[in-house]
Amino acid sequence: MKRSSNKTKGNKGFYAALGISAVMIGSACYFAYDQGNKIVEDYRSGNLVSQIPQVDRKVTNIPKPVVTTAYTAKAAVTAPRSHVQQVIGTVPTQQVQAVPEAEEVMEDVSGETVETAADFDNLIPPLADISNVIAPFSGTELVKNETTGSWQTHNGTDIAAETGTEVYAVADGEVTSVKNDALWGVTVVIDHHNGFTTKYCSLGADLTVQQGDKVAGGDVIGVIGDTADVESASAPHLHIEMTHNGKFIDPVTAIR
């Protein structure tokens, strides 16, 4: 009889513990369910969303981009070996060739060669006064366009002058293009038939030349306007570009 009584008590204790466990699990599930409903209700009512800070995405300026140029062999020769290995890895010594010294040649960000000086004699200044340069030729350097806020190379030279000031052909040549460009305004391009071309931008609408005309150095091709929308934040000026064999060069340097 005693064994039966002890067995009965043991069974009761087991079932009691099992019942308590079931009650605790049920309470936990109910709590989680209730919290989940509250979160859903907060989300639907907008209370949860309002707690997330809003990000101001208005762009007030365009930062200057970091331009990564090719790591040249010349740099590899002059830089410490540890730095060279970090940038380009281990390079066999016999494969490193020094870059020839040539001040007139440099690399553009696009990979094309830009010439900074050329043999072009007896050039006529495009304006009677070319001293008031407000935006020089930048070569490979990125400069900020005050009109658009963007950073870019400036492939020409901006020379300030009053509207109506006469603009001259810098040398003999043929007018190969006359148009009203959406960005650069009224433009004239002259091919000098020796590898050089000049492009005159932001001219007035009243031109004295048309496509196909032959011009001599010093001939009036038009007058200063204010038609280049891409540089409209600047004072009235002539934007002049010069190329030699398709490569941009500094017009003022070539003229002087």
Image (spheres, rainbow, N blue to C red):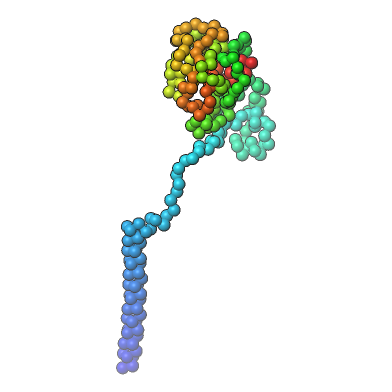
Q: Is residue 41 above or below residue 173?
A: below
Q: Is residue 167 above or below residue 25?
A: above
Classify residue 92 as left or right of residue 227.
right
What residue do we see at 62% from left, 36% from top?
90
What residue do we see at 66% from left, 26% from top?
98
x, y (%) of residue 157? Answer: 56, 22
Which of these two is toward me, 31 or 38? 38
Counting the numbered discs, the total is 0
Which of these two is toward me, 228 or 235? 235
- The answer to which quarter of the image holds residue 217 is top right
x, y (%) of residue 113? Answer: 57, 22
Q: Is residue 146 visible?
A: yes
What residue do we see at 67% from left, 36% from top?
81
Quarter of the figure that contains the C terminus: top right
What residue do we see at 54% from left, 6% from top?
216
x, y (%) of residue 199? Answer: 51, 16
Quarter of the figure that contains the N terminus: bottom left
x, y (%) of residue 112? Answer: 54, 23
Q: Is residue 7 visible?
A: no
Q: Is residue 250 above or below residue 48?
A: above
